């Protein structure tokens, strides 16, 4: 495969993730959409690392860091979601706009 095929796949994944993050009201779907966007970034990093102007391992190292950040984001996001669900009994983003005790 050539570089343009990987970039097209990453573009499609990123656009699907962006659409889901901007239009959906369910918090879990928004978190999954953000994960799709981060995976698209990982595909770009690894594709440029292997087939770019100067191939090296730098892109793969950055991809590992992105995976670590994504794991931390999911852990914090699920913890916040569970805390809000206990108080509000909903996972819709529209109903989580007030920060009261």
Image (spheres, rainbow, N blue to C red):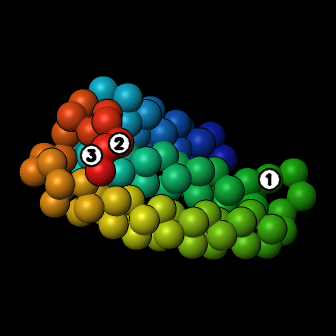
> Disc number at residue 52?
1
Disc with the residue nearer the chain's start (3 vs 1): 3
Q: Are marks 1 and 2 in contact (CB under 8 Å)?
A: no
Between tags 3 and 2, which lies in front? 2
Give the vertical position of 76 relative to 96 (above or below).
below
Q: Residue furthest left?
A: 89
Q: Residue at x 52, y 53 (%)?
A: 38
The Cα–Cα distance between marks 3 and 1, rounded to whole angstroms, is 36 Å
36 on left or right of 81: right
Q: Position of residue 18 (x, y in %)?
A: 43, 34
89 on left or right of 84: left
Mark 2: which secondary structure?
A: loop
The Cα–Cα distance between marks 1 and 2, rounded to whole angstroms, is 46 Å
Residue at which label 3 appears: 27
Q: Report crowding for label 1: few under 14, some 14 to 19, many 20 or more residues within 10 A (C-alpha).
A: few
Residue at which label 2 appears: 99
Q: Residue furthest front?
A: 101
> Disc number at residue 74?
none
Q: Position of residue 77 (x, y in %)?
A: 38, 59
Q: Is residue 19 visible?
A: no
Disc with the residue nearer the chain's start (3 vs 2): 3
Q: Residue at x 40, y 69 (%)?
A: 75
Give the vertical position of 49 relative to 41 (above or below).
below
Give the vertical position of 35 relative to 33 (above or below).
below
Between tags 3 and 1, which lies in front? 3
């Amino acid at each position: 495969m050539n570089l343009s095929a990987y970039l097209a796949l990453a573009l499609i994944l990123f656009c699907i993730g962006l659409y889901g993050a901007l239009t959906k009201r369910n918090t879990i779907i928004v978190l999954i959409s953000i994960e799709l966007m981060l995976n698209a970034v990982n595909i770009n990093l690894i594709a440029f690392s292997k087939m770019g102007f100067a191939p090296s391992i730098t892109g793969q190292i950055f991809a590992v860091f992105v995976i670590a950040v994504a794991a931390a984001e999911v852990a914090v996001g699920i913890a916040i979601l569970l805390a809000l669900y206990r108080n509000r009994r909903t996972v819709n983003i529209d109903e989580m706009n007030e920060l009261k005790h």
